[in-house]
Image (tube, rainbow, N blue to C red):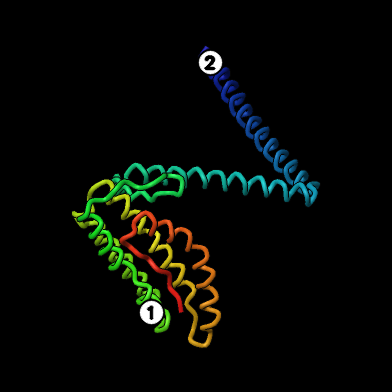
Amino acid sequence: MKDRRKLTTGIAGSALVLGCAALAWFLLRGGDERRAAAGAAAADESPEARRERCDERREEQAARLRRVLEAGRRNADDERPEEPEPREPIRRRSAGDGPPAPLTGTERKALAAAAETIYSPEGLRQALESGSAGDMVREMHLAYAEAQQDESLGGPAAQEALGRLGLLLDYGLNVAHAQRPAGEAEGQWQMIERINRGFSGRIDALNADYPDLGIRLVER
């Protein structure tokens, strides 16, 4: 009885070993066949097909990279502090807005003084001659910023008028861009004359609405 159990156990163990060996042989054979098939397919693949396969792989990599970058940007946006609300700019009137609101006597004087501080045709012409028109325009912007803080120009009508003076900054910047070296003075003034033709109508409208200003264009 004991010999029969021993024989049965031996047969079962041998069968198990043979089964494991057969399974291993099958897996190895299958792997070899798959690798052989892949190698044959790669050998049979045309250059165009290989390029397409490479392009697809690069597109997949690029798509993964884009997803990573987008996730990083979203995280950065979540951590970015809120920016303060920008100060509302002074509104500039357009030609179709009709006549401006009237100014008080104090506002008219303050507006004229601000215009003289911001813009001087003689000063801008001298800056052109000395080659410092760019510096002159920066001073014009600083003077305009100071005028915005003038309490006598704090009313709605005065703020509207101050917004109109922004035209002087636009004009000064254009004139500064026309600046040329000393040997090209004729070309410089030809450009300034074209600028004057473009701005003359708006300057005339500004003077008509605010007669105390008396704005003049830069001339030779």
Which residue is found at the position 49% from the left and 80% from the top? 180
Residue topped by disc 1: 127
Residue type, mark 1 in image? Ala
Which residue is found at the position 41% from the left and 82% from the top? 131
Residue 199 coordinates in the image, percent (x, y): 48, 63
Q: Under tag 1, what secondary structure?
A: helix
The answer to whether 85 appears left or right of 128 in the picture is left
Residue 23 coordinates in the image, percent (x, y): 64, 30
Label tally? 2
Residue 162 coordinates in the image, percent (x, y): 31, 55
Q: Which of label 2 and label 1 is nearer to you?
A: 1
Dot 1 surroundings within 10 Å: few (below 14), some, or many (20 or more)?
some
Residue type, mark 2 in image? Arg
In the rendered image, which quarter is residue 115 located in? bottom left
Q: Is residue 189 above or below residue 51?
A: below
Q: Is residue 53 above or below residue 165?
A: above
Residue topped by disc 2: 5
